[in-house]
Amino acid sequence: MTFTKRLLKTKSPLLLALVLIMIFSSCNSQQPGLVWSDEFNGSELDKEKWSAIIGDGCPALCGFGNNELQYYSENSQNLKIEDGRLIITAVHDSIENSAYSSAKVASKGKGDWKYGRVEVSAKLPSGKGTWPAIWMLPSNNKYGGWPRSGEIDIMEHVGYNQGMIYGTVHTQSFNHMNGTQRGDSTMIEDASETFHEYAIEWREDRIDWFIDGEYYHTFDNTGKDSDDWPFDHPFHVILNLAVGGSWGGSRGIDDSIWPQSMEIDYVRIYAF
């Protein structure tokens, strides 16, 4: 019989209290600690935590390399804080010769991490042509440009496949340009009707994906080289809603659905 089990059998209130303290402390010591968060309780985007990305990706990668149709702005119709939520809205309008406008924010240089748990509570848009994403890119391209330094897609959703949530990584060995990307998907029927928590746990040997605390996918470190596993340096979080594109627009765009919004309730980062 272990020491703890013997204490649990004791009739002494003091010893029993000590056992409970020991168990509670042990559990706490194994939990990750919160190191960065945004609950979006202010009246505007916190510029100490986020930068708004402006433009259409030109001239380097027009359409951000994915043939996307939106122009990202920080206008209030596209980006605002309201009722404790970050609201990113795609609109069918005309800004800088683009037929649609939307918004994209990134924590680069203001929130960068290597390993940990990333949690984002979000309610997604719906309709053909929407392509919301919660994802991570390297803050410095340690191994070179995309995809050599890696990409972690915590959540992607395309409106023509309503409710199907995708979690994926892209590396030099495994990327969508070659059809070798590594990922999985799961159905969340009410993803556009209510908030769900999309999360990863990123460790030295693997990345695990969760929705509402339920595990559904793992990408393992093969132990070979950075072509397989470039995830050993700091990454930052990106939140955006694209319109169309090589994936989001592959089944066409329904021009009757706009505006469409992705709402974010919180972003929380925990260190292991």
Image: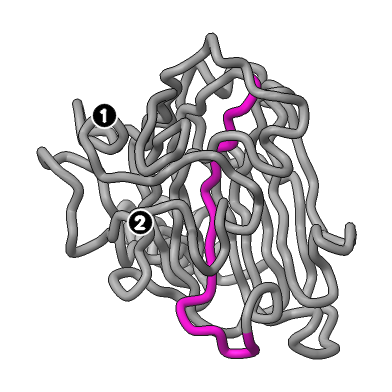
Q: x, y percentage for residue 224?
A: 85, 89
Residue on which the image places disc 1: 77
Q: Amino acid at mark 1?
A: Gln
Residue 3 lies in the magenta stretch:
no
Of 192 and 58, nearer the camera is 58
- Image quadrant where one finds the N terminus: bottom right
Q: Residue at x 58, y 56 (%)?
A: 200
Instruction: Judge left or right: residue 260 versus residue 213.
Output: left
Residue 154, image x, y percentages: 59, 51
Q: Quadrant of residue 18?
A: bottom left
Residue lying at the far top of the rendered structure: 256
Residue 155 seen in render: yes
Farthest front residue in view = 97
Q: Could you tell me which residue is drawn at 34 percent across and 43 percent down?
A: 266
The amino acid at mark 2 is Ile
Q: Is residue 140 magenta?
A: yes
Does residue 250 lie above or below 137 as drawn?
above
Q: x and y percent of residue 126 in the render?
A: 57, 20
Counting other residues with Cα less than 10 Å from the Cα at mark 1, is it few (<14), some (14-19), or many (20 or more)? some
Q: Is residue 159 above or below residue 134?
A: above
Q: Give the labeled residue for mark 2.
A: 53
